Image: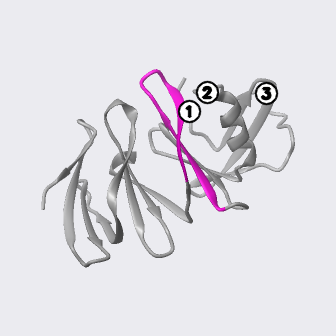
Amino acid sequence: MKLNLENKIVLAFGSAKIAFKKVGKEYQKETEATPKDKTFQILSFGDKALAFFHFNKARKLLVSPQGDILILKDDASGTSYIYVMNEAEVYNFVVNVPTLKFEFHCGGGVLCAIYPTYKALYYKGTRHQLYLLGGNFQTLEVSSDDKIFVTDSAQRSCTYLYDRYMQQMLIIG
């Protein structure tokens, strides 16, 4: 079952429920211990215990436009947990990263992690894997036609194209 993006997301983990309310582009965890909402969403996770631990710890939730990438942000520890949905509509934990901000580009297929001194680029590839594009980028710009212009710390520039249909990153210059 895909994530239904609404003003409030209430997820059930067995008898426990966790609620996130939409504030701007992200969702913030509600403070009540057990949400009283009658409607909630049941999502499938590869490791339910780990997912419950991450969701319970997180204070903010970012969701890709298609709902297939979930980023849980725990501001207390400065850690973010990234989950990606596979073809069986099961969310699997991919990686935890220390970061301040994330941006989705190219219809949600490209994820930019913004660190204090550089930017990292992840993209959703075939078989619903999340890949890190090599290099710590100083600048990163994305055009409306899914071209990504980057400059690394050695001031070398490169242009990539994210192919949404093939779910791959192509180097074009």
Instruction: Estimate the spatial distance between the alpha carbons at disc 1 and disc 3, rounded to whole Å.
Output: 17 Å
Residue at which label 1 appears: 3
Q: What residue span does the magenta drawing correspond to?
A: 78-96
Is disc 3 in contact with disc 2, using a CB cutoff of under 8 Å?
no
Image quadrant of residue 13? top right
Tell me if mark 3 has few (under 14), some (14-19) or many (20+) residues whose alpha carbon lies within 10 angstroms of its own. few
Mark drawn on residue 84: none
Task: Determine whether the residue tagged by mark 3 lies in a helix, strand or loop.
Answer: loop
- The C terminus: image quadrant: bottom left
Residue 26, how many percent across, how many down?
A: 59, 53
Q: Earlier in the sequence, mark 1 or mark 3?
A: 1
Disc 2 residue type (three-letter):
Leu
Of the two numbered discs 1 and 2 in the rendering, the one whose residue sits closer to the viewer: 2
Instruction: Estimate the spatial distance between the alpha carbons at disc 1 and disc 2, rounded to whole Å.
Output: 7 Å
Residue at which label 3 appears: 38
Residue 81, how many percent across, how many down?
A: 59, 48
What predominant SS class does the magenta segment belong to?
A: strand
Residue 84, how many percent across, how many down?
A: 48, 37
Instruction: Estimate the spatial distance between the alpha carbons at disc 3 and disc 2, rounded to whole Å.
Output: 16 Å
